[in-house]
Image (spheres, rainbow, N blue to C red):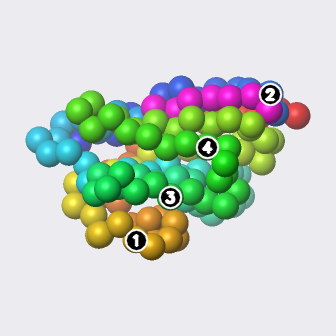
């Protein structure tokens, strides 16, 4: 049974940094694509960043571009989200998603965020205070 477990969330002051980690276990095969999503209270879930094994393509939402960095360790089936220059509007529950078989790397972040990820974590809270 595949499990997706996030860690590293918590509280930070505006301008600070946090690093989220997500480990996918229980799969014989590696994950073809992995992503981070977030949902603030009363809002829809939005894509934040995604990374594909093929070519190492990465994608970012405009709101986090230049501040967040997604990376992965394929050997460990782990994806990271380094979050710098945090803002209060980054406050949300962050979810990790993964899939073993993904569409070819898309041409835009929206394509990556519309990927039908099969595996999802339970979410981890990130709170940024001003």
Q: Secondary structure at mark 3?
A: strand
Residue 77, horizontal then vertical, whole percent: 28, 37
Q: In terms of sequence position, does the residue under pointer 3 or pointer 2 come before the other?
A: 2
Q: In terms of sequence position, does the residue under pointer 3 or pointer 1 come before the other?
A: 3
The answer to whether marks 3 and 4 mark residues whose Cβ atoms lie closer than 8 Å is: no
Q: Please give the residue where the numbered disc 1 appears in the rendered image.
A: 106
The answer to whether marks 3 and 1 mark residues whose Cβ atoms lie closer than 8 Å is: yes
Residue 20, horizontal then vertical, whole percent: 52, 32
Outermost front residue: 55
User: Which label sits in the foreground, 2 or 1?
Assistant: 1
The answer to whether marks 3 and 2 mark residues whose Cβ atoms lie closer than 8 Å is: no
Q: Please give the residue where the numbered disc 2 appears in the rendered image.
A: 13
Residue 12, horizontal then vertical, whole percent: 74, 27
Q: Can you say whether 3 is above or below 116 in the image?
A: above
Q: In terms of sequence position, does the residue under pointer 4 or pointer 2 come before the other?
A: 2
Magenta-colored stretch includes residue 20: yes
Q: In terms of sequence position, does the residue under pointer 4 or pointer 1 come before the other?
A: 4
Identify the residue at horizontal 61%, vertical 43% (top origin): 68
Q: Secondary structure at mark 1?
A: loop
Residue 75, horizontal then vertical, whole percent: 23, 33
Q: Is 20 on the left or on the right of 105, as rendered?
A: right
Q: CA distance from mark 4 to mark 1?
A: 20 Å
Q: CA distance from mark 4 to mark 2?
A: 16 Å
Q: In terms of sequence position, does the residue under pointer 2 or pointer 1 come before the other?
A: 2
| Nearer to me, 21 or 106 | 106
Q: Please give the residue where the numbered disc 3 appears in the rendered image.
A: 59
Q: Can you say whether 58 is above or below 127 in the image?
A: below
The answer to whether marks 4 and 1 mark residues whose Cβ atoms lie closer than 8 Å is: no
| Residue 92 in sight from this viewpoint | no
């Amino acid at each position: 049974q595949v499990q997706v477990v996030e860690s590293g969330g918590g509280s930070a002051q505006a301008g600070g940094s946090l690093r989220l980690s997500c480990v996918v276990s229980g799969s014989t095969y590696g994950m073809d694509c992995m992503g981070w999503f977030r949902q603030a209270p009363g809002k829809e879930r939005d894509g934040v960043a995604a990374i594909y094994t093929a070519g190492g393509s990465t994608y970012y939402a405009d709101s986090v571009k230049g501040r967040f960095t997604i990376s992965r360790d394929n050997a460990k089936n782990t994806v990271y989200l380094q979050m710098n220059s945090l803002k209060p509007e980054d406050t949300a529950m962050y979810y990790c998603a993964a899939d073993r078989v993904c569409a070819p790397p898309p041409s835009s972040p929206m394509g990556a965020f519309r990927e039908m990820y099969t595996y999802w974590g339970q979410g981890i809270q990130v709170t940024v205070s001003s």
